Image (cartoon, helix red, strand yellow):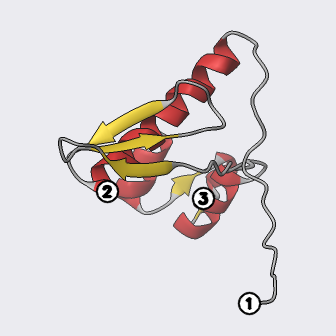
Amino acid sequence: MRLLQWAVEGSFKLPNDRRLEPVDALASFWEGVTFICMKFRVTVEPDEDGVFVAECPALPGCVSQGKTREEAIANIRDAIQGYIDSLKKHGEPIPSGMTEEIVEIPA
């Protein structure tokens, strides 16, 4: 409701008739919030029917597909999120995200 008020009126009215301007309101809203992004490696390959199959090897059984490569990637992103949400719900450990190193060798 307060965000709706901000969008309509352009500021929040605080106690003692103080107003919080939109930029300050957003900063205040997100203060203390930490966003954690995890990266997972996925493979995307076309199958014999021309459908793109996406798989996340770090999450056993986490597979999706799409008519296009982009759709398969969007679908596997949703599947990964659902997989992680299920692990959290059941108190299971969440696999660490992708960790990789680049190794150079002489040609």
On residue 107, which mark appears? 1
Q: Is residue 40 left or right of residue 3?
A: right
User: Crowding at label 2, few (<14), some or many (≥20) Cα neighbours within 10 Å?
Assistant: few
The residue where tag 3 is placed is 25
Residue 41 at x, y percent in the picture: 61, 51
Disc 2: which residue = 70
Tell me the kind of residue under disc 3.
Ala
* Looking at the image, residue 97 lies above or below residue 17: above
Quadrant showing the N terminus: top left
Q: What residue is rendered at 74% in x and 90% in y?
A: 107
**Front residue of 65 and 27:** 65
Under mark 1, the amino acid is Ala
The answer to which of marks 1 and 3 sits earlier in the sequence is 3
Q: Position of residue 58 (x, y in %)?
A: 66, 37
Residue 10 found in image quarter = bottom left
Describe the element under mark 1 as helix, strand or loop: loop
**Which label's residue is closer to the chain start, 2 or 3?**
3
Mark closest to the chain's N terminus, 1 or 2: 2
Q: Residue at x 60, y 26 (%)?
A: 60
| Kind of residue at badge 2 | Glu
